[in-house]
Amino acid sequence: MNADIEHLLRIEAPQVLGALVRRFGRFDIAEDAVQEALLAASRAWPADGVPENPRSWLIRIGYRRMVDLLRSDQARRRREQEAGIAELAMLEPARQAGPAQETDDSLALLLLCCHPALSATSQVALTLRAVGGLTTAEIAHAYGTPENTMGTRISRAKQQLARAGARFTPPTDTDRDSRMAAVTQVLYLIFNEGYTASTGAQLARVDLTSEAIRLTRMLHRALPGDAEVTGLLALMLLTESRRPARTSGDELVPLDEQDRTKWHPDLIREGTELIDSAWKRREVGPYQLQAAIAAVHAAATSPEETDWPQIAALYLWLERLNPTTPVRLSRVVAVAKAYGPARGLTLLDDLNRRFQLDQDPLIRQRERAVRAHLLQMTGDAAGAARLYREAAALTGNQVEQRYLLDRADRL
């Protein structure tokens, strides 16, 4: 399919879904109807050309499919009645699918997909499917699970929304903050999975990082005054700016060895301006602090010029706001860079005693890699090689595996 058409369909999908959910109130069936409309467009538009009003075209097809889906389940009287109501709605001039509204429903859809009744994984999957426009196969690949397993998970998530009585309504002042926290966390998770894929032959999933940035830009346009949303977008842009230098061929290149002339200057400029604007509001949150750390890295033209004491201080601040194992391990790295590997190992031992970083499934692989690097810096080659191999065995990303095993072999 033509790339321009594919991009257009991805942009229009949440707007079409929003129109159907607002009219019929059935997210589970509406999402299926949208997928049918997108499939029809992918077949018709390359041959016939893109219609003058593509959103109206998609909504019209989606409406027809909604009626078909509501009719199909004859075993349930309620759905049969809904089909009749839907058919009558189609006959009412005021409710027919006329010219598409220009309302952007993406924010309301994000809030709906991040409903508290759903698990974090289901929130991410549903957001990628409904708002991001990714296929079930693409989402399954991102998580390293079979397509039918992911399809079942998405189907159950839609059923949970129906049982929870989730409605397509704009956020209110009372629930905006709590729901927005879930939305930003979902977007953050999507970006992280794309930046370093949990499985597969590629280090990164550019489709996921690009989609996370696109959705976060959309969120930022809707909420330009939200300092944490601004910080999240800045973090993504500054981090993504380093992607061209992260690999050489099929091999991973660590931060200290990257060719910084390959870093994307436009993304660095935009990300830095965003975090500077958010920082002035004096409403510091975790995403802003992470963006500030990324900005310090971006400001250094060489590894030697990196202000590691400032980064260590920012991580300490971040740990107080967001005391998670990944943040604590990142502080270990910053302390070791700023004050030497021995001090980093001492801090790592202390954090392991108090918080069991080495047992946390989320970071146990990275904990071993960090410890191995610090042992290597202190001269313990045998201990470092052993831990590099342990770390390699704990990752499903083949690029990371090769890098870690190569480090062990060189020792």
Image (cartoon, helix red, strand yellow):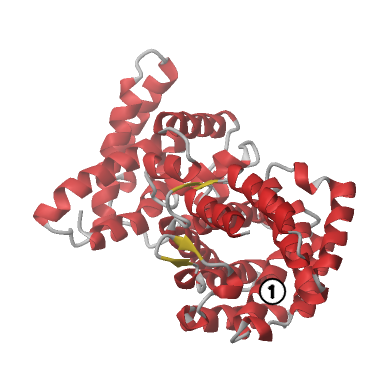
Secondary structure category for the residue under label 1: helix
Residue found at x 69% / y 74%: 293
Q: Which one is nearer the viewer's eye here, 388 or 124?
A: 388
Would you say 60 lies left or right of 276 here?
left
Residue found at x 50% / y 50%: 109
The residue type indicated by label 1 comes to Ile
Name the image quarter holding residue 137. Answer: top left
Would you say 58 lies left or right of 243 here?
left
Assess disc 1: are there few (<14), some (14-19) or many (≥20) residues with their C-alpha within 10 Å of its C-alpha: many
> Residue 276 location, x and y as percent?
66, 83
Q: Which one is nearer the viewer's eye here, 293 or 387?
A: 387
Residue found at x 41% / y 29%: 148
Name the image quarter holding residue 163. Answer: top right
Residue found at x 53% / y 33%: 157
Is residue 222 positioned above or below 297 on the image?
above
> Residue 17 location, x and y as percent?
39, 47
Can you identify the residue that label 1 sits on? 293
Q: Is residue 408 visible?
A: yes
Q: How many marks?
A: 1
Q: Which one is nearer the viewer's eye here, 24 or 193?
A: 193
> Residue 165 location, x and y as percent?
58, 33
Is residue 349 positioned above or below 378 on the image?
above
